[in-house]
Image (tube, rainbow, N blue to C red):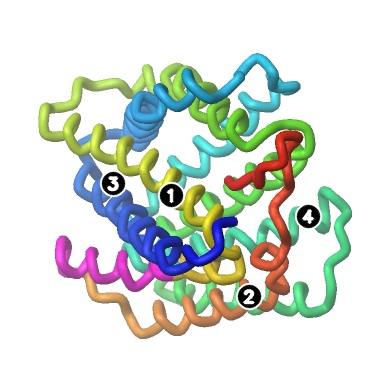
């Protein structure tokens, strides 16, 4: 952590919220024209291309104690991205983003069920309240509900599963190698599953896909560096800025206006997430690698 640079770190997190929202906008612009698996491939490919100089110059890939687990985690991450892309393509963007905020609740639930970590009454209450928030947004009723929003929920579950793996793998591997191997393993994996739906993208589509991959890599860099400059307790809540930013962009690009239930449900989910995690993710110091550096993901 670098003292006196909190303001810069906050600015970087705000910029990351805008970049993350642009990701959703690009997916919606490509919806119906480019298959979600193709979006996942090009996002991973161009992202890897953008950070390959950093990987070659700084990351010792062979030192990683894992092989198969990198592929498993890449598969989970890919599946979560594709599920979220499907939700962005078909459901209201603000609704999908708000539901995706449930990821930390599933992370706490998984830590309790899988890793046998202790979970207090406040966490259980927060998780229950979070699901109430999801129901407020989805609004199930006699006339049915928007089933595309379930993909955002599935994306949150799969992301939490990937993060649980990351927590275990980070005990024996460095942050740089984990990030690099995830990018490297994702590209061939998504290439294989994408081939049956392959179609040649147009120049404009390829431009958007390249922009998405580069923005994703830059977004990851911004967040990583921001957490190296300021306390997680200050920066982590700024992730919730994604909702108003994506709502504004959805209005400007697609004239989408979130329903009042979206804001109410999102407020419940955000509050439930803060209570359910007990602030653990924000207060806990990141693990330190063997070189003495903090690991950020």
Q: Residues within 10 Å of mark 2 (few under 14, many from 20)?
A: many
Q: Residues within 10 Å of mark 3 (few under 14, many from 20)?
A: many
Q: Where 191 falls versus 18 (above or below)?
A: above
250 part of magenta stretch:
yes
- Give the label on residue 111, or none: 4
Q: Secondary structure at mark 4?
A: helix
Front-most of residues 280 and 30 = 280
Image coords of residue 93 (percent x, y): 33, 62
Q: Secondary structure at mark 3?
A: helix
Residue drawn at x 69%, y 67% is: 283
Image coords of residue 23 (percent x, y): 31, 49
Q: Is residue 129 visible?
A: yes
Residue drawn at x 45%, y 84% is: 264
Residue 218 sits in quarter: top left
The residue that label 2 is drawn on is 274
Tell me whether the residue at label 2 lies in contact with that at label 4, contact meaning CB atoms closer than 8 angstroms: no
Tell me whether the residue at label 4 lies in contact with that at label 1, contact meaning CB atoms closer than 8 angstroms: no
268 part of magenta stretch:
no
Q: Which of pointers 1 and 3 lies earlier in the amino acid sequence?
A: 3
Q: Where 122 falls versus 199 (above or below)?
A: below
Image coords of residue 185 (percent x, y): 54, 22
């Amino acid at each position: 952590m670098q003292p006196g640079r909190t303001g810069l770190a906050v600015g970087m997190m705000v910029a990351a919220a805008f970049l993350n929202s642009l990701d959703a906008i690009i997916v919606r612009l490509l919806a119906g024209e480019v298959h979600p698996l193709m979006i996942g491939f090009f996002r991973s490919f161009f992202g890897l291309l953008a950070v390959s100089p950093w990987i070659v110059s700084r990351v010792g890939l062979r030192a990683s104690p894992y092989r198969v687990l990198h592929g498993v985690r890449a598969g989970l991450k890919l599946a979560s991205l594709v599920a979220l892309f499907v939700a962005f393509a078909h459901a209201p963007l603000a609704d999908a983003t708000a539901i995706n905020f449930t990821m930390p609740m599933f992370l706490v639930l998984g830590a309790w069920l899988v890793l046998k970590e202790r979970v207090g009454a406040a966490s259980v209450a927060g998780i229950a309240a979070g699901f109430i928030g999801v129901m407020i947004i989805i609004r199930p009723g006699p006339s049915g509900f928007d089933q595309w929003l379930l993909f955002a929920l599935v994306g949150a579950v799969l992301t939490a599963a990937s993060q649980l793996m990351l927590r275990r793998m980070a005990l024996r591997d460095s942050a740089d190698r984990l990030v690099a191997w995830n990018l490297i393993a994702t590209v061939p994996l998504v290439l294989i599953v994408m081939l049956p739906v392959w179609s040649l993208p147009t120049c404009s589509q390829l431009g958007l896909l390249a922009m998405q991959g580069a923005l994703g890599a830059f977004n990851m860099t911004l967040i990583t560096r921001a957490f190296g400059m300021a306390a997680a307790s200050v920066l982590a809540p700024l992730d919730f800025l994604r909702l108003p930013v994506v709502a504004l962009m959805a209005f400007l690009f697609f004239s989408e206006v979130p329903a009042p239930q979206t804001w109410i449900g999102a407020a419940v989910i955000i509050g439930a997430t803060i209570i359910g995690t007990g602030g653990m993710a924000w207060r806990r110091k990141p693990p330190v690698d063997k070189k003495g550096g903090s690991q950020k993901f």
